[in-house]
Image (cartoon, rainbow, N blue to C red):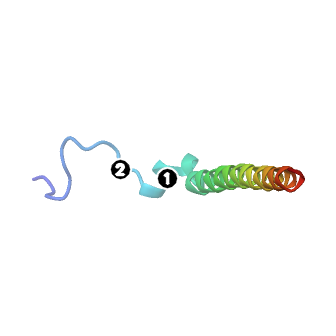
Amino acid sequence: MTRPDVRPDAGPEVRPDARHRGERGAAAVLATTAVAVLALVGAVLGAGAAAAVAQRRAQTAADLGALAGA
């Protein structure tokens, strides 16, 4: 007589935590890497925006100086 809770084609039973033991912490590493990349992209975009604002202010000052001298 066969047990109803065992499938005949089932392989050896493995505990769920033992199956992925080598992948433990992989999500934390992935999340940390994603946060670091996003922070780096944000810093680069922020520096670019600051440079654009500085250039625009300098151009405005030059334009106003030229108009005042004309």
Picture quarter containing residue 60? bottom right
Q: Secondary structure at mark 2?
A: loop
- Point out residue 46 in the picture as x, y percentages from the top left corner: 72, 55
Q: Nearer the viewer, mark 1 or mark 2?
A: 1
Amino acid at pointer 1:
Ala
Query: Which residue occupies 13% across, 52% down?
Result: 2
Q: Are marks 1 and 2 in contact (CB under 8 Å)?
A: no
Q: Which residue is mark 2?
A: 13
Q: Residue furthest left?
A: 1
The residue under the point 34% across, 45% down is 12
Q: Residue reaching furthest right? A: 69
Give left or right: position of 66 versus 9. right
Q: Residues within 10 Å of mark 1 (few under 14, many from 20)?
A: few
Residue 51 percent location from the top left of the image? 78, 50
How many numbered callouts? Answer: 2
Q: What is the x, y in percent for residue 59?
A: 80, 49
Would residue 21 appear left or right of 67 to someone viewing this image?
A: left
Closest to the observer, 19 or 63 = 63
Residue located at (82% from left, 53% from top) = 67
Give the secondary structure at mark 1.
helix
Residues packed near mark 2 inside 10 Å, few (<14), some (14 to 19) or many (20 plus): few
**Circle on res. 18:** 1
N-terminal of the pair, mark 1 or mark 2, is 2
Query: The disc labelled 2 sits on which kind of residue?
Result: Glu
Q: Nearer the viewer, residue 5 or 51?
A: 51
Q: Position of residue 63 (x, y in %)?
A: 80, 51
